[in-house]
Image (spheres, rainbow, N blue to C red):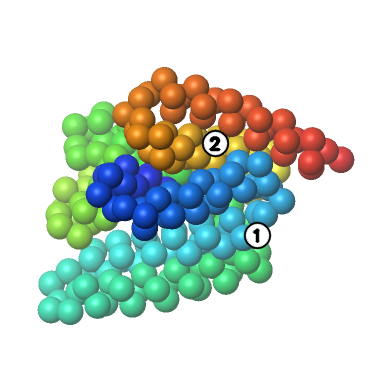
Amino acid sequence: MWGFLNGILVDYFESGGPVMTILAVLMAVYYFVLCFFGYKTRRVFASIVGFLGGVVAGVAFAYLCFSELEYITLIAGVCALVIGIGLALLAWRFYNVGVFIYAMFTAYGIVYNLAAHLFAEHTMPSFTGFVTAVTTAPEHFSRVAMGIAIVVAIIFAVLAVKFVRPLLIVSTASHGGFSMAIVISVLLHQANSLPIVLGLGLVLLIAGLIVQIRMTKG
């Protein structure tokens, strides 16, 4: 999901002018907060994750169930909005729901790719790849890989809810740190510089871990 936004930024920054620069700065600020204050802002974070997770689930549900209908795009949009808002509100009230959704989607993507490789099926490399596959060729999904991924994802998500604090600190520091490094590299016109992204990402990750652990100690 987040790779989708970063992908847009990298693809269109050069031609987007001041609008894309403003978007990049706003994204950098968001990732800064996520990296250093992820656990403290967990309700907001959980709501965002719940909304985005609901959007993905809504689009997938619509295209898998109603792909033959004439107004499928409208149906997908309505499903995405309704499920997204519903999960966002639920995650705000019970932020563990957001943690569960975040952990489940993360584990599902990783496990599905591994299982799909084992069964020589199509992979799901990113959020955009997921949406593209669901909306254009849902029959390409490996049912075996999906089954394995769903089971593992649910188990991982349940464990994540039991260990909320360490999971959120590590995940928000790493996600926010490396994502902020990507945005900064784009602003510096060094989007393809892997050493800069990895080096800066590691520094931000370590700094984020230290700050969050000290802020939440006790």
Q: In which quadrant of the rendered view does residue 18 lie?
A: bottom left
Q: What residue is rendered at 72% in x and 31% in y?
A: 210
| Numbered mark located on residue 43 in the image | 1
Q: What element carries label 2?
A: helix
Q: What residue is rendered at 65% in x and 54% in y?
A: 42
Looking at the picture, which amino acid does disc 1 mark? Answer: Arg
Looking at the picture, which amino acid does disc 2 mark? Answer: Gly
| Numbered mark located on residue 177 in the image | 2
Instruction: Single out the mark in the foreground, 2 or 1.
Output: 2
User: Which of the pair 127/121 is nearer the observer?
Assistant: 127
How far, Cα to Cα, is label 2 from label 1?
A: 19 Å
Q: In which quadrant of the rendered view does residue 67 lie?
A: bottom left
Q: In which quadrant of the rendered view does residue 60 lie?
A: bottom left
Q: What residue is rendered at 41% in x and 20% in y?
A: 195
**Residue furthest right in the image:** 218
What is the x, y in percent for residue 127?
Answer: 33, 49
What is the x, y in percent for residue 218?
Answer: 86, 40
